[in-house]
Image: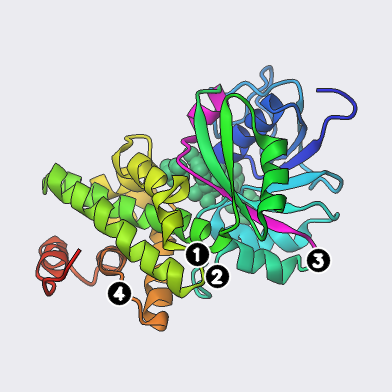
Amino acid sequence: MTATSPHIAVIGAGAWGIALACASARAGARVTLWSRSPVTPGTRTLPRLPAAVLPDAVGVTSDLPEHADLTLLVVPMQTLRSIAPRLKGTSPLIACCKGLELGTGDLPLDILRETQPDRPHAVLSGPNFAIEVAMGAPAAATIAAASLDEAHHYVGLLSSPHFRLYASDDPIGVQIAGAAKNVVAIGAGIAIGAGLGENARAALITRAIVEIGRLAAAMGGRPATIAGLSGLGDLILTCTGAGSRNYSLGLELGRGTSLAEILGTRSTVAEGVATAPALAARAKALGIAMPITETVSAFLAGEIDLAQARRHLLERPITVE
Ligand SMILES: NC(=O)C1=CN([C@@H]2O[C@H](COP(=O)(O)OP(=O)(O)OC[C@H]3O[C@@H](n4cnc5c(N)ncnc54)[C@H](O)[C@@H]3O)[C@@H](O)[C@H]2O)C=CC1
Ligand SMILES: O=C(CO)COP(=O)(O)O
C-alpha cells in the first residue's frame, strides 16, 4: 500500500465484509471498513470473523465513509435498501450480497439503480466462504457490470494472487445465480438431512442449473452464466460445503427441526430463507417453471411436508433433458 493506492470502502462488517476488506488490502488497496461493532479490544479482529486479523491497510470506522475509489456493499440483502440511500460520494458501487428483496422481488442492482441512480453499479459473486478468502486461501469470483471494460476496471482493483476475479457483462445472470443457489442449498441440505441420499442432491444441483438459466433468460440474462463461478461454482460449494449457512439450515430442517427453532439459534444471515418466496413469486409472475425453488419455498412456508416436497419433484410430468 502507498499514498497513491486505490481507496476501497467496505460497507458492512459481517463475515463477508471482513473477508473482502482483507482481500482488498492484499490487492494493494487502502481500505475503510464500516462496522457497527468496534474492533475487539487488544486485537485487530471484529466479532463476526474473529479468526481474521485485519491487515494494517484496513481502517475500521463507525461513520459511513464518503470518499473512496470503489465502494463494496456487503450488508445482508434485506437491509440493502435501508443502507444504500445513506451512502455519500460518487464512487462506483459493487453489490456483494446475494438474494432478492422480499416484497418487491428486486435484485441488488435494481435497488442501487433506484437509490443511487447517478453512480455506476456492478455485482461481485462466486463460490467464496468468507473465512477462506479472509485467510488468503485461493478463490475466484465474478464481477459483472454493464460493460466488460467497466467490469475489467473493478477486477483490476480487487484481484490478487489469492483472489482471482473474472469480468462479465451479464449482471442479471450473475445476480440471479447468486440469489438462487442459496435456495437450492437449503433444498440440498433438506435432502441430505432427511436421508434421501447423494443421488438426490446431485440431481437437485444439476436440474437447478436448468431452472435458474430459464429465469435468467426471461429476465434478460444469459443461461451460460449459470454454468460459471456465480452459478455452478457456488452451487457446488454451497450445496456440499459444511460451512454454508443455507445448506446447514436445510440439514437441520431435513432432520426435523422447525424453521423458527433454527432461526432462533442463529445471528448470521441465511439469505435463501427470504429469497425463496421472492424468487418463486418473480418466476411465477414471468410464467417460468422453477420446481426446485417453488418446492423449497413452499416447504419453508410450512405449506408442504417432506413427503409432499418429494412428490412435487419426482412425480412431475416426464420431460426431456
Ligand atoms: N459469509 C460468506 O461466506 C459470504 C456471504 N455473502 C453474502 O454477503 C452478504 C452479507 O453476509 P455476511 O457478511 O456473511 O453476514 P453475517 O451474517 O456475517 O453478518 C451480517 C452483518 O450485517 C450487519 N447488519 C445486519 N443488519 C444490518 C443493518 N440493518 N444495517 C447495517 N448492517 C446490518 C450485521 O451487523 C452483521 O455485521 C449476504 O448477502 C451473503 O449472502 C457472499 C459470499 C460469502
Ligand atoms: O455465499 C456463500 C458462499 O459463496 C456463503 O454461503 P452461505 O451464506 O450459505 O454460508
* Residue at image location 55% in from the left, 45% down from the top: 142
Above/below status of 52 relative to 17: above
Which label was assigned to residue 118? 3
Instruction: Write down the residue under mark 4.
Output: 289
In front: mark 1 or mark 3? 3
Residue 131 within the segment the image draws in magenta: yes
Residue 64 is situated, as x and y percent measured from the top left of the image, at 79, 48
| The residue positioned farthest toward the right in the image shown | 3
* Element type at mark 1: loop
* Element type at mark 2: loop
Circles 2 and 1: CB atoms closer than 8 Å: yes
From the image, which quarter does the C terminus lie in? bottom left
Residue 240 in view: yes
Quadrant assignment, res 87? bottom right
The residue segment tinted magenta is 118-135
The three-letter amino acid code for the residue at tag 1 is: Leu
Instruction: Write down the residue under mark 2.
Output: 106
